[in-house]
Image (tube, rainbow, N blue to C red):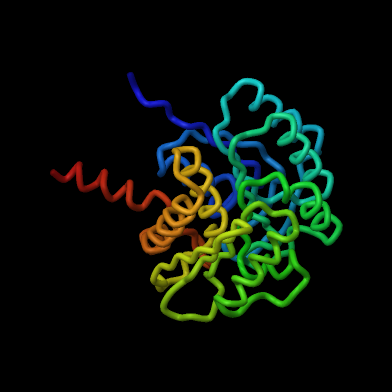
Amino acid sequence: MSRRIPNVLTIAGSDPSGGAGIQADLRTFAALGVYGCSALTALTSQNTLEVTAIHLVPPPFLRQQLDAVFTDVRIDAVKIGMTGSAETIEVIADALRVYRPPFVVLDPVLRASTGAALLDSAALRVLLSELLPLVTVVTPNTYEVGMLLGIDAPDSVSAARAAARALTGRRARAVLVTGGHLADPTVSVDVLDDGSDVQESSVSRVPGTGTHGTGCTLASAIAAFLALGSELPRACRDAQGFVARAIMHAPELTVGRGTGPVHQLGTTWNRHQDDAAV
């Protein structure tokens, strides 16, 4: 009997240049051996240099997408990325209450890697009150955890630990503060706090500019590993390693003139090329 392949749903925006959003999520799912479904929250006009326009999907149509998927497909985990508005967040939260997927990973996308703001203050309040309590883990970077808490972005691992604990006090079940923006030039340290235990995991920093889509990729990888049966700490560690490898393979791509995308399929493509050469 063949193994059951997990189904993972991404609820996020679309990046036409392919570096972030559902495009990055679906590549991550494929690389990790899970089947990807998607529900669009927004269409964006963006590339590796800038975001020039955002068209939010009408919330009733988003709900139709979610109902269509959940009523037909067994969903083993959900990844949430760009939400864009308070109304969109309310639709997602209501669907989670109705369908109760076993794992939910929230990447609180507040701005694009190019610097464009993607969520206003009203929507941020709804995210904190309605969506945050429903997710398995939220994965802010240091800028995002500062915005969620209304404080300066943490600039050290100890400050990241304090921020993670503070956010669990805001009804988050677990918080993973990612360390890519911390000042240490040699290692990136992620801090996971589940409200009772704190764990740190680190990887060596990979030089290069191919970092577009790291947050999307990390959250999607965590969702995939949870769907595959990993416990949360292991899922977060393995996802961190997956992102590091995706950054390492990024120079193999030649996409755009700005911050290039990570290469989620780099290891897979290289393995296939090696097999073909034998």
- Which residue is at a point 77% across and 58% down the rendered structure image? 119
Q: Is residue 73 left or right of residue 85?
A: left
Which image quarter is the C terminus in? top left
State whether residue 204 appears in this view.
Answer: yes
Q: Which quarter of the picture shows residue 169?
A: bottom right
Q: Which quarter of the picture shows residue 138?
A: bottom right
> Depth check: 201 or 273 in front?
201
The residue sitting at the front extreme is 196
Q: Is residue 41 left or right of residue 198?
A: right
Q: Which quarter of the picture shows residue 277?
A: top left
Q: Position of residue 98 (x, y in %)?
A: 74, 30
How many marks the image carries: the answer is 0
- Using the image, determine if residue 255 lies above or below residue 42: below
- Using the image, determine if residue 183 lies above or below residue 6: below
- Which residue is at a point 45% across and 65% down the rendered structure image? 201
Q: Position of residue 179 (x, y in %)?
A: 53, 69
The residue sitting at the left extreme is 278
Q: Position of residue 261 (x, y in %)?
A: 49, 59
- Which residue is at a point 33% across and 18% down the rendered structure image? 1
Q: Position of residue 145 (x, y in %)?
A: 68, 66
State whether residue 47 appears in this view.
Answer: no
> Depth check: 138 or 71 in front?
138
- Using the image, determine if residue 167 lies above or below residue 90: below
